[in-house]
Image (cartoon, rainbow, N blue to C red):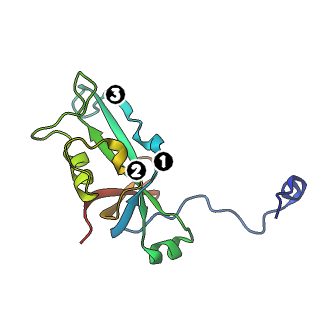
Amino acid sequence: MAFNVDEFLSSQLAAPLATQFEVCPEGEFAMLLDSDPKQLQPREISGTSEKTGKPYHFFQLELNCLVQDEKVKAKLGRDRVPVRLRVNLDIGTDNRLESGPNKNVALGQLLEAVGANKAGAGLTAILGAGPFMGKVKHTSDRRDTNRKYAEVDRVTKLR
């Protein structure tokens, strides 16, 4: 069926539209990482802590984990259920990932969960990788506590 702009513009709402997304329920689910390479572009984050007044500066990846649970997909009425995973990065002055104790632990856990935590592996190895288990938790919007967001809180190898 070809898209008809005139029909679209003359259409009327049959009912009010939703104003919020229903988010993935909390729980542990099998997941895959999205294959979009754009998600490997680190975000640079800086500011001043409201609690301490001290400045902060770091880099972060925002990765889309795709829930593979058919019941969740059916409940939400979607074929694709992405849930965000934020990974803070420890980057050295040479613009490379740091390794060692307490460095890039969350990224190491993700790499381990998808079988890519090996010397010589590049970050592109995680694109489309999985399956792995991801724990989904909900957080509330700071300004509207009724608005919930789903986030991946922890990842492990598929059992």
What type is the residue that disc 3 sits on? Ser
Residue furthest to the left in view is 101
Of circles 2 and 3, the one toward us is 2
Label number found at residue 46:
3
User: Measured from the top left, where is residue 29 in percent x and y?
Assistant: 35, 69
Question: Which residue corresponds to the image point at 26% horizontal and 52% vertical from the top-left?
Answer: 116
Q: CA distance from mark 2 to mark 3?
A: 27 Å
**Residue beneath disc 2:** 127
| Quadrant of the image containing the C terminus | bottom left
User: Measured from the top left, where is residue 134 in percent x and y?
Assistant: 31, 63
Q: Nearer the viewer, residue 122 or 25?
A: 122
- Helix, strand or loop for disc 3: strand
Q: Residues within 10 Å of mark 2 (few under 14, many from 20)?
A: some
- Helix, strand or loop for disc 1: loop
Disc 2 or 3, which lies upstream in sequence?
Answer: 3
Identify whether 13 is placed above or below 86. below
**Residue beneath disc 1:** 36
Disc 1 or 2, which lies upstream in sequence?
Answer: 1
From the viewer's perspective, is 62 left or right of 104?
Answer: right
